[in-house]
């Protein structure tokens, strides 16, 4: 836990501190990349400037400025400001802070702004401990999280806070931050007189993937690698960036966002987008069997009998993952993704099951018609089980046209309605012939 006084600098000024820490913005005017939130006239900026901030949740990817914004608020406010990390703190620290906040309000008439980094790491009971003090007005809560607050912050706390979404920094914003660090002789690398090519700055910005901290760390690493030449070019950056870690959390929201993007791209018959999202997942370390399971599901849900081979191909991809593992199985998964994306689409099988399942769950469960029952014992035969059943293979067209197989309440009902795409067009034609015979 740490306290920030009004005159304490937002970033470290120690020469041996990391560049990303030294270059933290000291004012909101230096704060780059979140103009939609903090530009002049925006509601959050006005609340900060007028010191009337209410509890907020800052939600965004790493390196987008959540902690920096909280520290800038600390500089601008007249409230007592306390900051601690959910990773390092527990219920004991929470109770201490709550007591301190109550005393500050009672004795000094001052609110406490409480900043909680990674609030999603607190469990429900820990989050609940803040509620009484938030409701009493003793504290204004600022929570920072990389996870979707809808899932990770309890509803009572969320209902009392405004959620602000911080977006990944754009390439221009990241390059602006890098240029400032190169030029700043006091806090940055200006004293080194570095020669940084524009292509190198662009390469570092792409590598950072919207994370200012990653970009500044890369710049500091490149400055060290440049040595006496003091020259940073695109080749040097490319060499340092060979093993970029992609933004991905296999248990977080991005996991579901990417599989959703893959699924919807295949559904929309876009093989280029489909293989791109597949690569994003696999190169980030996603479990290939999870991807294979989703492909099997897609094959029956979105392709179905329009291309009957789709399910077999998806299952074969699953077997390839088992047999070869990664990275060799990546092409088997890619082949399947491209096949599914370019295959004719039909959700008729999916709809048929949903409709049948709804009927089975919500309507009267009629007995199986007697002629469809299996007469495996003498008693069953005496009760006319199987009486009237007609063996389809003995019929001229392989169909007993006048034998009903649905229970009486559902006679004439259609659950499966094939599309006119791919192989289902042939199935549709066949079903129409059968219906004519039954009529």
Image: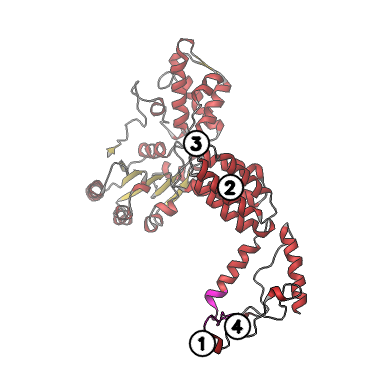
Q: CA distance from mark 3 to mark 1?
A: 68 Å
Circle 2 residue: 262
Q: Is residue 236 above or below residue 205?
A: above
Q: Is residue 367 above or below residue 89?
A: below
Circle 3 residue: 246
Circle 1 residue: 379
Q: CA distance from mark 2 to mark 1?
A: 56 Å
Q: Residue furthest top?
A: 228
Q: CA distance from mark 2 to mark 3?
A: 17 Å
Point out which mark residue 386 bears.
4
Mark 3 or 1, closer to the camera: 1
* Front residue of 438 and 106: 438
Which one is earlier in the sequence, the residue at label 2 or at label 3? 3
Image quadrant of residue 201?
Answer: top right
Quadrant for the C terminus in the image: bottom right
Please tell me which residue is depicted at 46% across the width and 18% down the height of the picture: 223
Which one is earlier in the sequence, the residue at label 2 or at label 1? 2
Image quadrant of residue 388?
Answer: bottom right
* Residues in magenta, as a range: 359-379
Q: Position of residue 369 (x, y in %)?
A: 59, 82
* Front residue of 20 and 307: 307
Q: CA distance from mark 3 to mark 4?
A: 62 Å
Q: Dot 1: within a 10 Å radius of its alpha carbon, few (fewer than 14), some, or many (20 or more) residues? A: few
């Amino acid at each position: 836990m740490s306290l920030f006084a009004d005159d304490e600098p937002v970033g470290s000024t120690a020469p041996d501190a990391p560049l990303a820490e030294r270059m933290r913005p000291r004012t909101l005017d230096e704060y780059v990349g979140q103009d939609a939130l903090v530009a002049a006239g925006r509601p959050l900026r006005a609340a900060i400037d007028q010191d009337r901030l209410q509890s907020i949740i800052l939600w965004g990817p790493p390196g987008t400025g959540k902690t920096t914004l909280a520290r800038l608020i600390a500089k601008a406010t007249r409230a007592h400001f306390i900051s601690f990390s959910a990773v390092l703190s527990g219920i004991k620290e929470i109770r201490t802070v709550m007591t301190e906040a109550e005393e500050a309000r009672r004795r000094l008439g001052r609110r406490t702004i409480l900043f909680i980094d990674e609030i999603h790491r607190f469990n429900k009971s820990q989050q609940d401990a803040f509620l009484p003090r938030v409701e009493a007005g003793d504290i204004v809560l600022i929570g920072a999280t990389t996870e979707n607050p809808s899932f990770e912050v309890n509803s009572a706390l969320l209902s009392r806070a405004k959620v602000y979404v911080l977006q990944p920094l754009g390439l221009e914003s990241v390059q602006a931050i890098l240029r400032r660090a190169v030029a700043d002789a006091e806090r940055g690398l200006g004293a080194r007189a570095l020669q940084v090519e524009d292509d190198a700055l662009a390469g570092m910005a792409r590598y950072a993937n919207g994370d200012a901290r990653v970009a500044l760390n890369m710049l500091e690493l490149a400055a060290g690698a440049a040595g006496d030449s003091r020259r940073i070019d695109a080749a040097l950056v490319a060499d340092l960036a060979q093993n970029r870690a992609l933004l991905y959390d296999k248990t977080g929201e991005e996991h579901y966002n990417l599989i959703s993007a893959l699924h919807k791209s295949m559904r929309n018959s876009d093989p280029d987008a489909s293989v791109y999202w597949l690569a994003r997942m696999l190169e980030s370390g996603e479990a290939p069997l999870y991807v294979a399971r989703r492909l099997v599901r897609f094959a029956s849900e979105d392709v179905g009998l329009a291309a009957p081979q789709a399910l077999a191909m998806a299952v074969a991809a699953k077997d390839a993952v088992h047999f070869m593992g990664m990275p060799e199985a990546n092409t088997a998964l890619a082949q399947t993704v491209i096949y599914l994306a370019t295959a004719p689409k039909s959700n008729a099988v999916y709809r048929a099951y949903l409709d049948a399942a709804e009927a089975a769950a919500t309507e009267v469960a009629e007995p199986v018609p007697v002629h469809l029952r299996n007469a495996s014992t003498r008693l069953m035969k005496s009760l006319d089980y199987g009486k009237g059943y007609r063996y389809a293979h003995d019929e001229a067209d392989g169909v007993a046209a006048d034998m009903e197989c649905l229970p009486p309440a559902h006679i004439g009902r259609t659950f499966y309605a094939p599309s006119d795409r791919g192989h289902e067009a042939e199935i549709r034609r066949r079903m129409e012939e059968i219906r004519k015979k039954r009529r």
